[in-house]
Amino acid sequence: MQAPSTAESPVHAGQRSFDPVALAVITSRIQGIVRRMTNTLFRTARSSVLNTARDFSCAVVTREHEMLATAESLPIHVMAGPDLVSASLARLHPELHAGDAFLHNSPYHGNSHAGDHCLLVPIVSAGEHHFTAVVKAHMADIGNSMPTTLWANARDVYNEGALIFPGVKVQRDYQDIPDIIEMCRTRIRVPDVWYADYIGMVGAARIGERELLALGEDLGWDTLHAYTGAWFDYSEEMMAAAIRKMPAGRSVAQNKHDPLPVAGAEDGVPVKVTVDVDPENARVRIDLRENPDCMPCGINLTEATSRTAAMIGVFNSLPTTVPQNAGSFRRLDVLIRENCIAGIPVHPASCSTATTGVADRVANATQRAIAELADGFGMAETGTLTASVADISGKDPRHADSPFVNLIIIGLTCGAGHARGDGWLVSGEVGDGGLMMRDSTEVDELLYPIVVWADEIVADSGGPGRHRGAPACYVEYGPADTEIEAMWSTDGYVHAALGARGGYPGAPARQFLRRADGSVEPLPGWGEQLLKPGETVLATSAAGAGYGRPWERALERVERDVADGWVSPEQAEEAYGVVIRDGELDAEATAARRAELAAQSPEPPEILEVEHRSREISDRLGPYVLGTVPPQ
Amino acid sequence: MPDPATSTPGTPPPGTQLGGPPRELDPTLMAVLAHRFEAIVREMTNTLFRTGRSSIINMARDFSCSIITADDQLFAAAEGLQVHVLGAGLQTRSMRELHPDLAEGDAYLHNDPILGNTHTADHTILVPVFIDGEHLFTTSAKAHQADCGNAEPSTYVTYVEDVYAEGGLVFPAVKVQEGFKDVEDIIRMCRKRIRVPDVWYGDFLAAVGAARIGERRVKEVVARYGVETIKAFVREWLDYSERVMDQAIRKLPAATLRASGKHDPIPGLPEGVEVNVTVDVKPDDGRVVFDLRDNPDCIPFGLNVSEYCARGGCTIALLNCLEDDVPRNAGSFRRVEVLLREGSIAGGLVEPYSASVSTTNVLNRIINAAQSAFCQLGEGQGLAEGAGAMGVGYAVFSGTYPPTGGAEGAGSAATGDPYVSEFVIGNNGGPASPYCDGWITYAMPDCSKTIYIDSVEMLERTYPLQFRSLRLLADSGGAGRHRGGPASEVIYGPRATPMRVFYMADYARHPAKGVRGGLPGTAASAHEIATDGSETQVEAIGDSLLAPGEWIRGVEAGGGGYGDPLEREPAAVLHDVLERWVTPGAARDVYGVVLSELPGAPGQLAVDEPATENRRVELREQNEARGQES
Amino acid sequence: MSQTAGARITCDIGGTFTDVVVSDDSGQMTIAKALTQPANLFDGLRAALQRAADELEEPLAQLLGHASLFIFSTTQATNAILEGTTARTAFLCTEGFPDILVRREGGSLRPYDYSRPFPEPYVPRRLTFEIPERIDADGDVVTPLDEQAALAVLTRAREKDVGAVSVCLLWSTANPAHELALGELIERELPGVPYSLSHQINPIVREYRRASGTAIDASLKPLMQRHLPEIAEGLREEGFAGELLAASSAGGVVPMDELIESPLWSVRSGPSLAPVAARTVAHAETGSGDVIVCDTGGTSFDVSLVRAGDLVFTSETWLGEPFAGHLTGLSSVDVRSIGAGGGSIAWVDPGGLLRVGPESARADPGPACYGLGGTRPTVTDSALVLGYIDPDRFLGGKMRLDVGAAETAVQGLADALGIGLRETAHAVLSIANERMIAAIHELTVNEGVDPRDSTLVAGGGAAGLTILAIARELGCREVLIPRAAGVLSAFGGQHSDIVREMTAPYVTNTVDFDYEGVRATLASLRDRMAAFESELPAGLAGELQRRYYVEARYAYQVWDLSIPLDGEGVEDEAALTRLIESFHDAHERIFAVREPGQKIELSQWKGRIIASTVKPPLAAEREHVASEPSARVAYFPETGEVELPVSEGAQLAPGEDVAGPALIVEPETTIVVYPGWRAHVSELGNYRLELKDA
């Protein structure tokens, strides 16, 4: 499958034919509209996954189903996806009317995964369809047979249990179609929360509709459509320019998704990405076809997330000045095939975790492949989330045992070292491009009967490198005098983030269960755990990997890392070749050690094991968690 | 939720008093129209049966059609699956409440047990029938689907804590046709979430066809006789039916009866589930009250019973025990009061509890308890317990067709396609009655004999599986003056690709009881047979994954006996032995009947009168002795 | 004296009467009846023939000698089954599946009635024997036939001195080897004992239907193989030298040997000639169109249908009550028979509703008006009270009816209902009609036939009494009562062709249609048809007609619709498209829905041979004797009590009209011309009744 080809699109014609000032003005106005959409949902949503973690995105798509604009959205949501759902909508509902709204979450019709509900509102003026406002949000619950929206072990879409809405009309004449709402209320846990979030999405999309209509009336629709053409041409030119600066060549990168209890995935799922950079023709081609067939579990990617993951890998390696829209996308060819874990899923394959897991592996491999082309390009691999990001559900004794279910997002430090700097600390998986927000501990404890005991950086965990990966964080939480069910799907437990250009891997994820009697036992990479009062989950996320050889890292940066306790003196000396004694830099010893390292140029370690660091924290916290600290 | 069986209908016509003749309509027309409506439902039934796609519909006939009045009174129902039809009014009510704007050409898909359906596996198509813009009737076609999108490939899931874990799509009276055309959105949702979508859609079309045929015919009848006449007829017919029920109940002695039944223990429920029924028979006001309120709360398993099923079950029990043939509609049901408690396992279903197995297991215990309670009224009253095992002979089976094709009927499917459906091939023995032995093809209490049986050849043609044997078992029916119906044993397995079977047999530990001295029937069981022929008994509620070469053997349960076996006609026992329903040993030791060869006619058995006399005396003494011990 | 060269003689040997119809080249028809002699059927037949001969004023030998064709039909088989007087029959089945005949296909008409015992199987379990063998759905042998075990079984069967053996093994339709092998063993071990093999009797999938038909067939063989030759012999001795044919339930006639080979086809063969008769008359009188046929016997009412000139077939022929009786499994003429007749008793139920039947007073004590001790009101009593029956001329005056007794009986009902005597009597008739109307509705609507556009043809003794009331309810504007209404089946025999249907199973579908395979299948079918045609008695058959059908269903369905092929087969895409369209249309016509684009499966290919026989013309000769009609009083709801004319049928000339209300008295029946109707005597001597304003 090819991204829209550009052979005939007149790149320069665009700018010439459209006044550059107007181009800039309209662009910022449309950006403004999307931002207002985003703000609306952020303010009105009910579940913390939306109103705090902001796990949602807003976008505007043209009548030709081209991605026009998004604002601070999760890349995994919006690069490819809005265009695909918009196209499938046109297929399924040839007639679009003002006042219509559609609910769309079908992984087989262009959506990211069933856990993301899309609300699509066609912008129709005088009977003519001009744009589509798209709001995509990760719901707290979607009616899966297990109380989670990310279920790697789902055998197929039936077993997954989600309600699947292939572009289902949910509003007519600006009124809800009660049938659909009733179906959701009957089959989605905590219906009031779902409905409130749904209303938030409707609000966001209707705001977009209102303002786009105003803009259309104001500028005239023809101008607006002329603008989109010009804007796409401009974006394509920006993209082309960036690609022309890249090193030519082919680079292949492979990594592995952690083992799954599924035939063929017992020791992990291999992911392979082949990147061809062609500066001459200003094209980048990413081939994902050499990956395994769909598997009987929830990790299969959707068409949207396969394309997007590859694109993310590329954009992470480009200057941020390149707009992300259908125009710039024209320069990317993502090759995928049907019935492939990183391609187009075949019904009834489950795609429950299509926005994480394999998607991260694809993006990571892509950006690392680019890094290996030449220094100063690309990015190391980003870490992954753990049980510190989990679906929790149960009954809240504080509110008459009313049921609750939600995705808590506490530990969120995964950033990878890249060509221009260290890993971004507060970053979720590569898929969220650092845009996802952490929950507020106070808000979480307010909304749900949980106690968060700890949320702190783990020393030495960030993959050493010229540019260091972001360190992992240690999170410990448990129920507050009730029982809660926690479910998580952790990648990065066995196969950690890999470094680029000699950078070291990030430390792998680790998690444990602390029993009420104080005993601590390891927890599996995916799983579900019923937490009884007094029990806690100890979760260390998978840290980001390093870029470039550690011993080439600027001395003062290493000194600061040590001073801040992000790196231990031992690791500073061992990996970075920086010797610090009693807080003082030993210049000589450092020079010697660095020369030694430069001479040996040691291979990065298979695994950066810093479990003892997490242990230190958990031992320290133990007495508090167990309430065995004698009152002072 | 108010109770359609007891809620009052349109104001009764002046001068209709019980026993008295109908005044508003001449008796001829009454009978004429009654026949018309029956015929319409029969035609609906035939349509669904002939056009259904899954074996559970086109062979087992696990569906039912009915006509309901605009004010939610069940009006006409054919000999469909009984628990399906007796509560139909609940569903049209929720349809009307959720869709105040019903219009001609609409059709609604309803399978929500909380809103008055049986269980989620029964998809009900409701078509409101309009005459000159007025909603007069609703035609209903309710069919058990081969699959309803559950998380596991079974339409009966026991081990699920709630409706979410159950996983099936729930349609709270969702509009699925508008202007006689499909609402494509809904169809697409089903096609993405129900296994083997072509089969589902075919069955959907079949149900729509049935409901539309009903719509057509009802309109013809109204056109022929006029709206006012039909309205009068509806009132009269319901009142008439109430009178018949009144008369029937007046023949019963007044009493308050209590009975209980116990669903087998299952993993997680070591005590099983005990259900209690209190029956208040009030001949003087021609009314019977069933009280199901004294029962446990809903449990985190699929066994909870929906309101629809609980009401239907009590009505079945009553009808089973009445002498007269009473018309089955909201009119006669006015005399049947069913008291339910919200939140109770017996008809008080609340969100988000699962009623996945609502139509069978616990329900069958309720029906049996209720019908056997009537035996307390004295000799000649009530029924024994009927067997109700949803065992291997009623399992939901699934898998994929072999890549290389299979039977002539890998049938409709392309090779490698998935398949899923439910067997209705087993045999549970019917309850013995005061009049005769238990019905053989009884199926189970909630079906009341009406369900059909699969054809072994059709199953083998349609699915890649094979039967090794299917037979009725001697001595399986509970002994008694009248004998319980026999149980079946069935053995089957996959042909070339693995097959998953889900079975949910109650009556494995607590078999169907006999009454008035009658003995219980035999218990149900399930056994896996390995390729080497070795056999392991497995949990009677569970599932098995069978590889080619492996088999599963299932025994359903036998019906309970009525009356003392020692009072059974020796001639009847002789016939039983000759027909291999009873072994000679059981004849001697349980019935006390001694058989011997006729002198000069080798092989010709006859009752040895004197020996039988002695044997029966002997056994009576033993029984009394045993009685004193315990 | 009339000319009888090339006469064509048909007889219908019923339970009580043996009807004979003789017609000559001129179409002159002679009808005669005699009591049936169960002991020796031919005695009864000879008596009837003798009467015909007397009426024609010629010796029986001469009548028979000149006859070119004798067509024979009997209800013997049907009666034998219902009365359980068939042979003691063994049932051999695949080991592991002994209870096929016991469980049937499940189901019950009375869910709450626990007072009736479960019906006994057609063959008791003690005569059921399991044979170690198994063939699978592909026809592959899973377990080879164990001949030793089979021999042991046959020995046991001999000890139990069975009179016939039926064999139905699973999937014998896919591979008959084991059944054929058993056949040979039976001939060897039980010489002279007739047997039936299921794949030969009726090669359909579904074990119960095939087994049931096979068991019935075998159980009839001893009886029929005695009776039929007796009759053949008897006729020859009396001088008959022409061709001897017998009616089959396929709606036609076959050489008698065929029937002796598989007597299952003679079950309900008589009634299936009624629609043949109706088709003939309707075609002659009103041209083509759909025809509803009602044949009202003394205790039963048979409905059948002629759709666009074709008989309608069903595979659901139950002997006895559905689910409780026994299924023949054959695809035979769809004749719905309901127990309804003059003897049905009327009563008021506990709810105060008037009911008719199912209890019947039968012949003894019979209706109150018979004066044989019956006191409960029946349909006949009500008809008498209404004045529709002339008490002095019941059964051609053979029995005098007691009007007082009838009135007393009906008055009882009237009091209970609080309405008048005549209103009550009329209500009883209407309600009795209703069950017939329901039966007609089911038959017609299931076939997508609209009664309002159909012609109603009525036959049988009670035909004329209420047929117009029924017609009015159905909305039929035209009713035909043939001259031979009293002997509809025998008359049908006069006009039936030789009909033989052959089946070739071959599975394909419309998505990847196998032209070659279908071509080959139909070719082999044609060979078999040709073989049958060449066997036909020379000179008997006129033109030969072949029709082809295919049993079709949507993917995953299991019940087929029989779709006629236009032409000899499905040669090209155009033909396939036509076939697909006609299936969709049929499905929508019958079931209200179609599924365009869905795969259609084609399983059984059928060829029907229709060898038309030489038939007598439908001429009418009525000597018109002018006479004044007598008068009597009758009651109609529209008119109340009214004096109306009573005409002698025999005295009405072709072209003559009788306006209702009026009575027309025929030897076998009385025609009640209701107010608003007009009876017209057609050129062919049949009665055409129409609504006046029509």
Image (spheres, rainbow, N blue to C red):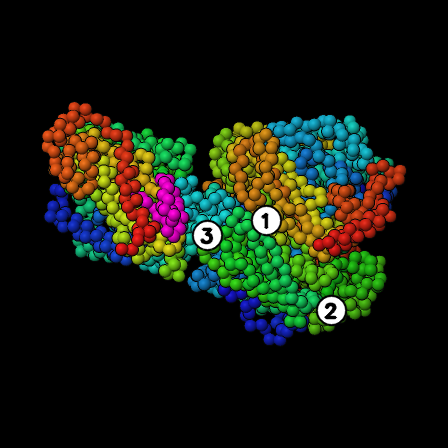
In the image, residue C295 above or below residue C424? above
Relative to the observer, which residue lies in front, B614 or B251? Answer: B614
Say which quarter of the image contains residue C502. Answer: top right
Relative to the observer, which residue lies in front, A354 or B79? Answer: A354
Q: Say which element carries label 3.
A: helix
Residue under the image location 73 percent in, 49 percent down:
B479
**Marks 3, 1: nearer the viewer:** 1
Q: CA distance from mark 1 to mark 2?
A: 51 Å
| Relative horizontal placement of residue A498, taking residue C611 as reference (left or right) | left
| Relative horizontal placement of residue C623, taking residue A153 as reference (left or right) | right
Q: Which residues are magenta?
A: A513-540
Q: Which residue is mark 2?
A: C413
Tell me which numbered mark, 3 or 1, is placed earlier along the sequence.
3
Q: Label 2 neighbourhood size at 10 Å, few (<14), some (14-19), many (20+)?
A: many
Task: Determine the chain carrying the residue at label 2.
Answer: C
Asked if the magenta segment contains residue C255, the reply would be no
Residue C389 in sight from this viewpoint:
yes
Q: Which residue is mark 3?
A: B163
x and y, in percent, of residue B224 in the image: 57, 62
In the image, residue B490 above or below residue C659? above
Is the same chain shared between marks 1 and 2?
no
- Tag of residue A107: none
**Marks 3, 2: nearer the viewer:** 3
Task: Determine the chain carrying the residue at label 1.
Answer: B
Asked if the magenta segment contains residue A519, the reply would be yes
Q: Which residue is mark 1?
A: B506
Which amino acid type is marked by label 1?
Asp
Task: Determine the chain carrying the residue at label 3.
Answer: B
Most extreme residue toward the bottom is: B15
| Relative horizontal placement of residue C513, taking residue B37 as reference (left or right) | left
From the image, which quarter does the C terminus of chain B lie in?
A: bottom right
